[in-house]
Amino acid sequence: MKLMVGLGNPGLRYEKTRHNIGFEVIDELAKRFGASLHSSKFNGLYATIHQDGEKTLLVKPLTYMNLSGECIRPMMDYYRIPAENLLVIYDDLDLPVGKIRLRQKGSAGGHNGMKSTIQHLGTTEFNRIRVGIDRPPEGMSVPDYVLGKFPEEEWAVMQSVIQTCADACEEWLKKPFPEVMNCFNSNG
């Protein structure tokens, strides 16, 4: 069994904000698989999809970004999912808008949702897709920037990136993550 988690904040106020790009990717995957994210467990919405006989959970934590690990860890424990079968999708200030980076381990890089996830899992070794949102313009605070909506021209780019991230997630259902990394990091 695999677990794909998109990080974000629940509620209409946060839809299509930079910090919710992980939710957008999970929504796209659910749409592709005809799944509904209406089941609830461990303070997260989830859907179950099946690919080649393997079950995968698509999850959107409802804990708010800074407490993401409080949903992810109990979900992993309950379903006995090892860290190597986890994939977390989240926004990254250190990448330009539209750039994606797949990694199998790494630090939180200042991202509070990842800090919480790492703290609750007790490891930095799990798969992730970092989605570039760039740094805020001079004079704008990071919280205001990440909780802000994309300008129209950036949103057009991000819609394409959401598709690419969902493609990478689908590939991981068929191939080992290092192979997916090789393909999508060279194209990203």
Image: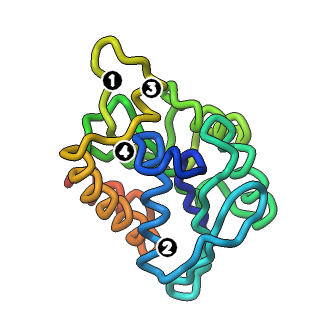
Q: Which residue is mark 2?
A: 30
Sequence-first tag of 3 and 1: 1
Kindly give the residue lying farthest to the bottom in the view shown: 53
Q: Is residue 20 visible?
A: yes
Q: Which residue is mark 1?
A: 136
Q: Is 94 situated left or right of 59 in this image?
A: left
Q: CB of mark 2 within 8 Å of CB of mark 3?
A: no
- In three-dimensional space, the C-alpha distance between marks 4 and 3, rounded to whole angstroms, equals 18 Å
**Other-residue count near label 4 (Cα within 10 Å), few / some / many at <14 / 14–19 / ≥20:** many
Looking at the picture, does residue 65 appear above or below residue 60?
above
- In three-dimensional space, the C-alpha distance between marks 2 and 3, rounded to whole angstroms, equals 29 Å
Q: Which residue is mark 3?
A: 144
Q: What residue is drawn where x is 73% and y is 58%?
A: 76
Q: CB of mark 2 within 8 Å of CB of mark 1?
A: no
Q: CB of mark 2 within 8 Å of CB of mark 4?
A: no
Q: What residue is drawn where x is 50% and y is 55%?
A: 23
- Secondary structure under tag 4 reads strand
